[in-house]
Amino acid sequence: MVYDSGSGEYKNWIVKEECVPEEHPEKTESIMCLGNGYMGQRAAHEDYYHEKSRFNLVAGTFDLMEGDEATELPNNADVTNCEITVDGERLTPEGGCESYEKTLNLKTGLLRRVFTKTMKNGKRVSAEFLRVVSLADRHLMASKINIVCDADCEIALKSGIDGNVWHKEHFEPMGISAVSDVLNITTRTKQSGILFSTMTCNKFSLDGVALDASPSVVSEDDMTIMNEASFALKAGMTLTLTKISNVFTSRDRERDGCDMASLKSAAAEHMKRAKALTFEEIAKASADEWERRIWSERDVKIESENEIDQLAIRFAIYHLTVMAPVFDNRMNIGAKGLSGPGYKGHTFWDTEIFMLPYFIFTAPDEARSLIEYRYNSLDAARRHAKERGFDGAMYPWEAAWITDGETTPPQYLTGQIEYHITADVAVGVYSYFVVTGDEDFMKKYGYEILIETAKFWASRLEYVAERDRYEITNVIGPDEYKEEVDNNAYTNYLAQYNLQLAIRYAKRLEKEDAETYARLDEKCGLSDAVRDFESKVDKIYLPRENEDGLVPQDDTYLTLKDIIPLKPGGRTLSEDPRESHNICWENGGLPKVMMSKQADVMLLMYLFEDHFTADVKKKNFYFYEKRCVHDSSLSLSTYSALAADLGELKTAYRLYGRAERIDLGPVMWSSHEGIHSASLGGIWQCVVFGFMGVRRYGEELRIEPHLPDEWRSASANIIWRGERLEITVTKEKLTVKNLTGGKAVSVLHKGRRHEVDGVLEIAL
């Protein structure tokens, strides 16, 4: 079991593991990871190792390891370790224990593990492990270990900093030291030259009374430094190790590019203050920040027959917080966040389409930072376009540091022809602007992104004289099972949309802001570019529905062999993906059959809902969902939210249930490389955009709820053009409260506009 409804104050806040993970420890290491956007600490156990278990990932510190083809986040030295022996026998829960429980409290960010074990000599030992990565201080983490034995015993502990972690090859040692009670390892990444300082301080106490342990410092190879201490423990007494640690790097915005001396000085000054604190003080400060910054503002409350629904949305918000480096606009969110090594820490379109909406509607300042990352990498995108023979800016399929450009390993076609990422970035810019009205952002960054991405599309279009239209051939759309296809509908529609946005805002600037227009004309050749855009935009081929009401995913998809009739009873592919894949390969493989990896046409209809009638959307939904194996964590949330739009609530809720169990469910290998970041953004969209019906519709705020039968109510706060709105939906009523009260907000509901400057109630 990896989730628990909890009780009392923490009901529907607790993620729990109830047995020792002998075979798949990576599952809860990922889903219970701690972090604050600056660093992520995987929830590996302190008292024993297994291969690839311990990760401390620091945002933005990309490095290229010798022999690799793409940069990745390096695995920093580990400070969580603690080897414990009782009368010479190693204490771990492995090999059987009387009780075991590991929990993550989403409300406070506290990781707790407890177990009781009878040792070979018959003595019964109980151990409690507590850990927190501070949300109040991004450089700080702390842990606490309590040990009690039912008989007198000798306890030995070995705790410190271990740089001999998986992928340590990224680092070269720069120094190792013990000054007073503080241990320090300094390293430098070999290719990118980023300096790391990692410090820890071990403090021992017995029944709350500090001990002078007189620890001996042990240095092993230049990458490990430990304290070793032994204590005679009386029966029933509690031995406590409190461990205060910090991490600083030369990539930190406050000390970008600093030398080792100044880095160590900053870390030492920080540690001097931090080690004076108790674990409880650090944990409380972090919990208070969770409440102040996150839960008091962004909690989504659901009354459901199934308690996992409430837990799942909080799980999503928790991870969207710990994974996002929103304090530094040179950084973005990785596909696995900071919870593990999957996808090397790279950023995909996952941010703009699946995660950014959460930040736009709940924390616009954080959303702005994430989009400014795209502006800060604009020069690299321009370089990438030029290298590929195009104009403007071509954003990389996989992005890392802002100057890296394309970081997709070269053997994957996605990095070469999955072009839609460039338009996805433009969609993110536009959505942010509509919801926030942030003209300052647009003048400094947004308009330029829209222009440069549109220039890319204008140069990428291919004119077909016999049809007098522009096409886009040899691409990969969102459905990555279909490579090198022509006229992927999602790609073509978004390319045109990108050009339309650039034209619209260029003309607005020309009329209303001559200064900004002149600056962009000089920098981007705006006047000439707009003329080029206008000559092409209306001739872009946009696949429309055929006589059956189906929009072809690409030029050939609807001509492929349909394998649905080959499945017993015509079941959907997603009901048995393994069987579906077998049938697929028996009939020519993925390129030859109507099998989709994930939402493609349906993602188009979700984003561009005003382009298609409800009847067309419904026909396409059932056609494509039946042929989709949802072999991507991005897929289920899209289908669920769209099903809610269509009033197909049983289907919407069924798909939502599958989405919320991608990480929280019982499949133990689903999250071993890290959590599914985009899926968690998708869960928020399922609830708020789907079931609650809160949506940006063009440039308006629309609310049309569709609660599933299993829910009694749902409520969430959003921010629309600077006004904070509390939205509550029941089966009988929609209530919108303007909590800010600065100005009235227009809300569109079933075609009618309502002004909200206080409280709006609408019967459903």
Image: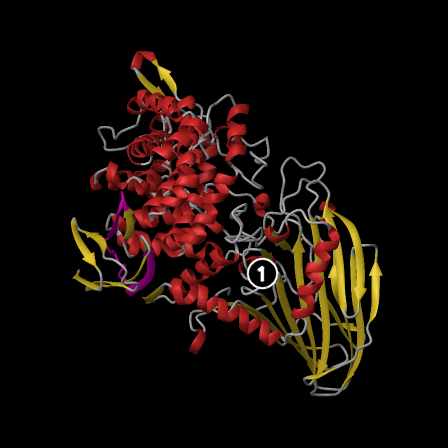
- For the stretch drawn in magenta, what is the main secondary structure? strand
On the question of residue 639 being in view, the answer is yes
**Circle 1: residue type:** Arg
Residue 290: horizontal and vertical position, in percent? 48, 66
In the rendered image, the quadrant that contains the C terminus is bottom left
Task: Judge by depth and name the residue closer to the eye, 21 or 722.
Answer: 722
- Judged from the image, the secondary structure of the residue bearing numbered disc 1 is loop
The range drawn in magenta is 697-719
Seen in the picture, residue 200 relative to 259 is either above or below; the reply is below
Q: Residue furthest top?
A: 466
Task: Judge by depth and name the residue closer to the eye, 703 or 589.
Answer: 703
Q: Residue at x 52, y 58 (%)?
A: 322
Asked where in the image residue 44 lies, by quadrant, the reply is bottom right
Q: Residue at x 39, y 36 (%)?
A: 447
Seen in the picture, residue 82 relative to 121 is either above or below; the reply is above
Question: From the viewer's perspective, is 633 left or right of 143?
Answer: left
Asked where in the image residue 88 lies, by quadrant, the reply is bottom right
Question: From the viewer's perspective, is 281 left or right of 514?
Answer: right
Residue 335: horizontal and vertical position, in percent? 52, 47
Q: How many marks?
A: 1
Mark 1, residue position: 138
